[in-house]
Amino acid sequence: MTVSSAVRPPKLEIFVDGSNFNLALMHDGFGHSVDLNLLATRLSREHHFVKLHYYTSPLPDAHSPAYRRQQKFFDQLRRSRRIELVLGRHEPRWDDSGRRYHVEKETDVNLAVDMVSGAYEDRFDVAMLVAGDTDYVRAIRAVQARGKRVVWCHLPTQRHTHQLAQLCDEKRELTAKFLRTCALGAHVR
């Protein structure tokens, strides 16, 4: 078989809603930090991996230890050629008693726009969506209208998002066993 007649594996881009993913990890009691490079490697088997896009927002309190840990994490992501970090923002709000809290803004829109534009620019054949949020339904439909496949990757606590399960071309549960192979310090086999 010549190189030109070989079947090329489908191009894959992975889209991770970081806050949604981390909340699901905590809810599922997963006690390890996930190495996103390993996650990309594990998810992209049988595909030609292009890029993992990670969407989140910086924490609002720049003086907190959590903010400093998050910035170190962002620095690690920025050093990877395989990962694109896309940041939104936190917007202050006040509840009825006057207490201030923050709402993450732009993350869902950034992810949806990038997924749809990637489909229209033919950057991928398959989009993997790592999220448990039905806000992405219209983006998924737009990607599929371009003839692209969408795989929904979810954690066990997110499996009841029936709308995503029915809409996507395939679904894949990210079990604790699978995620342990993607934990920081795990080795690729």
Image: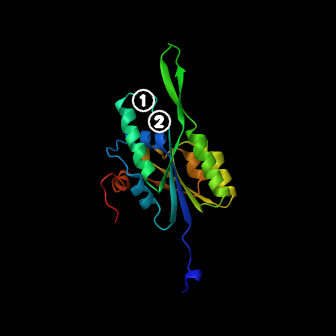
- Which of these two is toward me, 95 or 63? 63
Q: Quadrant of the C terminus?
A: bottom left
Q: Which disc is residue 62 wearing?
A: 1
In this view of the protein, which residue sits in the foreground, 34 or 135? 34
The reply, left or right, for residue 69 in relation to residue 121 is left
- Which class describes the residues within 10 Å of circle 1: few (<14), some (14-19), or many (20+)? few
Q: Quadrant of the N terminus?
A: bottom right
The residue lying at 58 percent from left, 37 percent from top is: 106
Query: Mark 1 is on which residue type?
Result: Ala
* Spot occupied by residue 4 in the image (x, y as percentages of width and height): 59, 81
Which label was assigned to residue 88?
none
**Image quarter of residue 170:** bottom right
| Farthest-out residue, left | 185
Q: Disc number at residue 58?
A: 2
Left/right placement of residue 30 relative to residue 54 reads left
Confirm whether residue 185 shows in the render: yes
Residue at x 64% of width, y 61% of height: 122
How far is the residue under mark 2 from the one under mark 1?
9 Å
Q: Is residue 108 above or below residue 36?
A: above
* Mark 2–mark 1 CB contact (< 8 Å): yes
Q: Amino acid at mark 2?
A: Pro
Query: Which quarter of the picture shows residue 168?
Result: bottom right
- Residue 91: % across, % down: 54, 27
Q: Residue at x 45, y 59 (%)?
A: 43
Asked if residue 45 lies left or right of residue 10, the reply is: left
The nearer-to-camera label among 2 and 1 is 1
Furthest residue toward top: 97
Location of residue 26 in the rendering, given as x and y in whole percent from the top left corner: 38, 39
Q: Secondary structure at mark 2?
A: loop
| 93, above or below 21, in the image | above
Q: Is residue 27 visible?
A: no
